[in-house]
Amino acid sequence: MNEEADKNLLDQQKRNWVSRWTTLGDIERTLIDKPSSGFEAWARTTAGVVVMLLSLQIITGLLLGFYYVPSTESAHTTVEYIEKVVPAGSWIRSLHHYGSMWLTLWLVLHLAQMFWRATYRRRPVAWIASVLLLALILASGVTGYSLPWDARAFFGTRVTEGIAGGLPLVGSAVREWILGGPEISPITLGRFFAVHVMVVPILILLVLAARLFVFRERALVSEAEERRLEVWMHRQVFRNAISAAVVFILLAIYSWKYFAPLGPAADTAAPGYLPRPGAQFLWLFQMLKYLPGRAASVVAVALPGLILLGLILLPFLNAKPIKRLIPHPRRTVGVVIFSFSFLLFTVLTILAYWKDATDPIVGAQLRRQQAEEVAFRSAPFTPLRARTSESVIDEQSDAKDSGKQADNASKNDNQGNGNTAVSNVNASSNMQTNVLTGGPPESYIINCSACHGTRGQGVQKFPKLIGVGSKPRRSVEDIIALLNDPKAYGLEAPMRSYADKLTEDEKREIAEWVASLKSK
């Protein structure tokens, strides 16, 4: 009996010390809710997973920020450096990339379990804070998508620009604010970066601070009841730790096996590039295909906004006039919102994957893009050359005349079409792909670029093809014969025969393109 009394006294002294020097006791009392057991207790561990994933986003974001430069000239090079040079850089970036998607999923699951327990009745501040956190994480995903500034990011930014520009009344102003001017420029990327790393994190911290330090939701209870709640809270923290650890291990393994996407730089993107958003936005991307013009812009902005607004207002839908119209209005409206959202997101996401898989033209283009990304990842890192280097000056001089006509055509198109999203996309494609005159054929990208690079520059141990046409026995006809029977030209594995894998036309277009590559 004396030992138990001494233990209780020691515990009380510890709590007094913590209360005197920290606010942890107040935070704990803010977080304590009605105790649960069994499956319900484990369902509530979504909170611990959300905290872990949010912390992981902050940590990995800071690590990436040590290397990233928010400039259209340097952004892609710095991300490539992270992927190819920084130790574990590709894994860290994958943790950040996929962690954002997983965080969205787990926040939705967290809201679902809160709704199941009717938390919006007892703890409306916790409910509203969770909904606001979901909205901010989605905003972070939109702005972070553009930061790598590869082809996927550039054309994704074009889609965002088109949605903003199509809004009625305010479309032009919103579009110009997003871009930082009339067209995509270095200011655009800087603006996305500022929102992603400063505005959104500050708003997240404000939401969390309000949740933990400003608003109180728990009624006063007796000392014995508070002790019982504290014991349960300590056990629940342990459950949260287990769930968070399991999810982290799964995310770490997934990120190690599947690296975050990164393709060639935006200014080398081939015409007809098909951007695809992250999994959390794929449903919206698919829905826009079925809506015309301005209607697509309105729905893309209004529908997610109305869903989030409906969830925020849920705790307040309990007035007597509403009860006369709808029995149990909060529960009924909540079920409608969750059911509609789940069906909409699930059906459209599955439909998006299915359409891409079954459309032969889209499938071929996506395979080409995938092959380009694989080849780009396999190529060694090439540092960004200074603008004053002689090779860059020579290349710019050579390209000046060939690009002049296309630039003039682009300007004429802009003057004729105004600021519509379609004319912006076309003008951008013209400006961004001037360098692609004489680019590699699709058959080369799919079959050869993984070893020889997207521009014939060679990849790791595999030889470059630049200047091959000037060597003996490397005419167009020789290259075609080499593709049919590499051993006849003294080439061993891994070079293999393409006699039955390529058509005669594909072999000839590859041979003619390779023969045209001239070394400076």
Image (cartoon, rainbow, N blue to C red):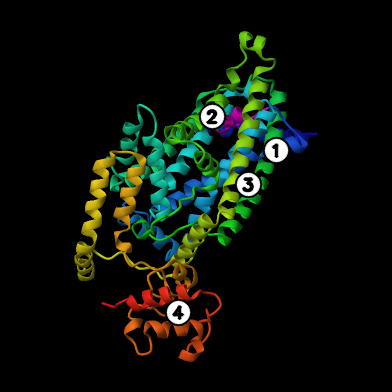
Helix, strand or loop under label 1? helix
Provide the secondary structure element on which disc 4 rests: loop
Of labels 2 and 1, earlier in sequence is 1
Q: Position of residue 81 (x, y in %)?
A: 39, 62
Gap between marks 1 and 3 measured at Cα: 12 Å
Which quadrant holds residue 467?
bottom left
- Are the residues tagged 2 and 3 within 8 Å (C-beta)? no
Distance from disc 2 to disc 3, alpha carbons, whole Å, reads 26 Å
Q: CA distance from mark 2 to mark 1?
A: 22 Å
Q: Quadrant of the C terminus?
A: bottom left
Residue under pointer 1: 43
For marks 2 and 4, the one nearer the N-term is 2
Image position, residue 221 (x, y; %):
67, 20
Name the amino acid type tagged 1.
Ala
Check the image and report above or below for 213 versus 390.
above
| Residue 182 placement, left or right of 51 | left
- Foreground: disc 2 or disc 1: 2
User: Label 4 belongs to which residue?
Assistant: 461
Residue 244's disc is: 3
Question: Residue 503 or 333: which is nearer the viewer?
Answer: 503
Q: Where is residue 92? Give x, y as percent.
A: 49, 56
Instruction: Mark 3 or mark 4: name the one nearer the start of the chain.
Output: 3
Q: Is residue 30 left or right of residue 176?
A: right
- Tell me how far mark 3 sits from mark 4, CA to CA: 42 Å
Q: What residue sits right under mark 2 in the picture?
A: 308
Verify CB contact (< 8 Å) between mark 1 and mark 4. no
